[in-house]
Image (spheres, rainbow, N blue to C red):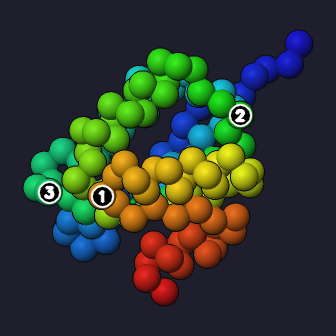
Amino acid sequence: MALLKHGISIGIERHGDDDFFVAVKAIGTLTHQDYEMMVPVLESALEGVKDPDIFALVDVTELEGMELKAAWDDIKLGVKHIRHFEKIAIVGKTTLQEVLAKLANWFTPAEVRFFVDNGDAIAWLKNE
């Protein structure tokens, strides 16, 4: 019996007093329960920081899909923190992921770019 691996891992670094570098890796098919576990971690990191600036590195190279409720959770999280995101670098491997990253640029004030190389994405986030 094969185990289906899925979930969201999150790492948070602070740069200065108010700038956040958030690394997110999505694996498998995301579920509502995955978001129920990840959102409190992110909320806890942001707690007490007045008007944080978030720079996000989102790795979707192992993402296979999302349940509908998980997609809704993702939208709610994005709307709640929409003004906090400055840059979002999406690292993926499919044309569909690239198209979705470009579409995201239309719906968020953050600058969103798609990358196939993790190093290029990090350099862009750090303005290198």
Give the residue at x 57% y 47%: 100
Considering only order in the chain, which callout, 2 or 1, is on the residue closer to the N terminus? Answer: 2
> x and y percent of residue 85 in the render?
31, 57
- Give the CA distance from mark 3 to mark 2: 33 Å
- Give the CA distance from mark 1 to mark 2: 27 Å
Residue bearing mark 1? 109
Residue bearing mark 2? 64
In this view, the residue farthest toward the right is 1
Give the residue at x 25% y 73%: 16
Give the residue at x 13% y 49%: 48
> x and y percent of residue 18 in the render?
20, 65
Q: Nearer the viewer, mark 1 or mark 2?
A: 1
Count of residue discs: 3
Pointer 3 with pointer 2, Cβ within 8 A: no
Q: Is residue 44 left or right of residue 39?
A: left
Residue bearing mark 3? 51
Residue 71 numbered tag: none
* Badge 2 amino acid: Glu
Q: Is residue 56 left or right of residue 59?
A: left
Considering only order in the chain, which callout, 2 or 3, is on the residue closer to the N terminus? Answer: 3
Image position of 98 with respect to 86: above or below:
above
Q: Is residue 91 left or right of residue 33?
A: right
Tell me if residue 113 can be seen: yes
Q: Quadrant of residue 55?
A: bottom left
Q: Please rate how many residues cluster around mark 3, counting C-alpha atoms within 10 Å: few if below 14, some from 14 to 19, many from 20.
A: few
Label 1: which secondary element: loop
Label 2: which secondary element: strand
